[in-house]
Image: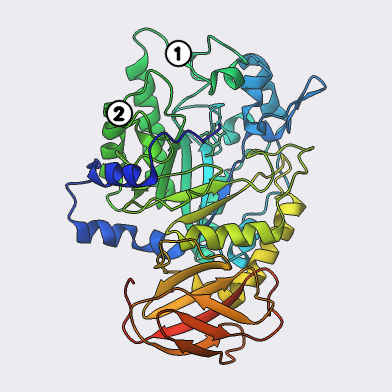
Amino acid sequence: MTTTCRRLSATALTLLLIAMPAAGAQEAPADRDARMKWWRDARFGMFIHWGLYAVPAGEYNGKRSKEIGEWIMSWANIPRAEYEKFAPTFNPARFDAAQWVRIAKDAGMKYLVITSKHHDGFAMYDSGVSTYDIVDATPYRKDPMRALADECRRQGITFAFYYSIMDWHHPSQYVDAPGKHAEAGHGQTRMREGRKQEYVDYMKAQLRELVTKYDPAVLWFDGEWVDWWTEEDGQDLYRYVRGLKPGILINNRVGKGRKGMEGLNRTDRVYAGDFGTPEQQIPASGLPGVDWESCMTMNDTWGFKHYDENWKSSQALIRNLIDIVSKGGNYLLNVGPTAQGEIPRPSVERLADMGRWMAVNGESLYGTGAMPFTEQLAWGRATRKDGKLYLHVFDWPADGVLLVPQIHGKVLTARMLAGGASVAFTQTTGITLKLPVKAPDPIASVIVLDIESSGGR
Ligand code: FHN
């Protein structure tokens, strides 16, 4: 979906967001901070879109589309009974939970969010309330979510689930404009008369299974734009899931927004949930006052498409991560594994590059806050934490002179994060650093300033 609708200024947006009480607003601020802490510190997570759509991999009856892979049931207008036929051929024998988690961990990611059920309604775990799941309907017969949840715990990665509210397969819903989502802006399902409660009960039963059996740290909802889902439904679902696990985090897409929020991008609103979810974009000034996480693809699809080779470079991905964290957000970077159970090689290679950068420079991102400058820095980005200011230099100055705007507090030392070499500096209104001639890292070199008294400018 395109997420470019911005009718309010960033300042107006921020004020509105701060003014909106969330469903969890009864919670004391200190309790909320404690609940959010691991997530705010983590900064970098892996999104995994994996489901039956990996079987057609973007191609149906010889036709390919520019649309996203996990939407093939909608854009190729595949009837339910036909789409179900992918299940007996779905046998991800090469799936290796330990390897997936290792790939995320080595990239420097701290958490993983995987599709338990996407819009196609197919459960990727062993559901007791449906047989339309990977254990009952495929020759694989095993539960990869069990393996992943266990492996995440073993390797120290936080495990979380995505869950779609809209369901193209559940009999309570039907699609009245098949294949039309591109023109309409988004696919819809219509709710059959009198069947909504049955579906809400079904969702709640599945969510109870997911929370009680797999203990996810986040429930990441999506598909809430359907016209039969309301903000009240979202708040009820929020309370239900928090009731199952009080410490869980829930994204904003559980609900729809209140009156007065119509002009806001749906992914930026924080109302029923705990954090905003800008999609395929980095808000220019962050979303001050709310927690947020940008979710983005590495190519142009979330679910695997065998012909999508439009990969972003490792440099672009590393700089996106820095950019997001410097604006106070988290980066949820997607991979779309194949039907055989493998993360595509181009994704693995890029994640390895990110991991190499993070192994040296991760300190400058984990647990940090947004940079203390209101204006964009021409040469890069900055983050701060515990009396330290981290400068991420994208464009290394040819004359070796780096100008940093004024900050509160006296700079005590300046050094390169990689290797620790000292950097000469002078501080007047701003700070002038005298850097080595050559950039130590062509993607982003990090300089650490120790500041006597930390805080904003
Ligand atoms: O329609 C989905 C899409 O398939 C994908 O899951 C993304 C991820 O944020 N969310 C939806 C659109 O907002």
Label of residue 231 in the image: 2
Closer to viewer: mark 2 or mark 1: 2
Quarter-wise, where is residue 187 in the image? top right
Q: Position of residue 374 (x, y in %)?
A: 40, 61
Q: Is residue 45 above or below residue 132?
A: below
Above or below: residue 426 compared with residue 210: below
* Residue beneath the point at 71% across and 39% down: 339
Q: Can residue 363 be seen in the rendering of this structure?
A: no
Helix or strand or loop: what does disc 2 sit on?
helix
Residue for badge 1: 190
Answer yes or no: is residue 280 visible: yes
Quadrant in which residue 328 is drawn: bottom left
Give the residue type at disc 1: Arg
Vertical order, 193 against 233 (above or below): above
Tell me the quarter of the image containing the C terminus.
bottom left
Mark 1 or mark 2, which is nearer the start of the sequence? 1
The disc at residue 304 is: none
Relative placement, left or right, of 429 versus 92 is left
Which of these two is toward me, 30 or 383?
383
Q: Mark 1 and mark 2 in contact (Cβ < 8 Å)? A: no
User: Please, what is the three-letter code of the amino acid marked with disc 2?
Assistant: Glu
- Is 137 left or right of 66, judged from the image as shown? left
Q: How many callouts does the rendering have?
A: 2
Comparing 92 with 18, the one in front is 18
The residues tagged by marks 2 and 1 sit, at their Cα atoms, a distance apart of 17 Å
Ligand 1's image quarter is: top right
Residue placed at 58% from the left, 31% from the top? 136
Q: Within 10 angstroms of label 1, few (less than 14), some, or many (20 or more) residues? A: some
Q: Residues within 10 Å of mark 2 (few under 14, many from 20)?
A: some
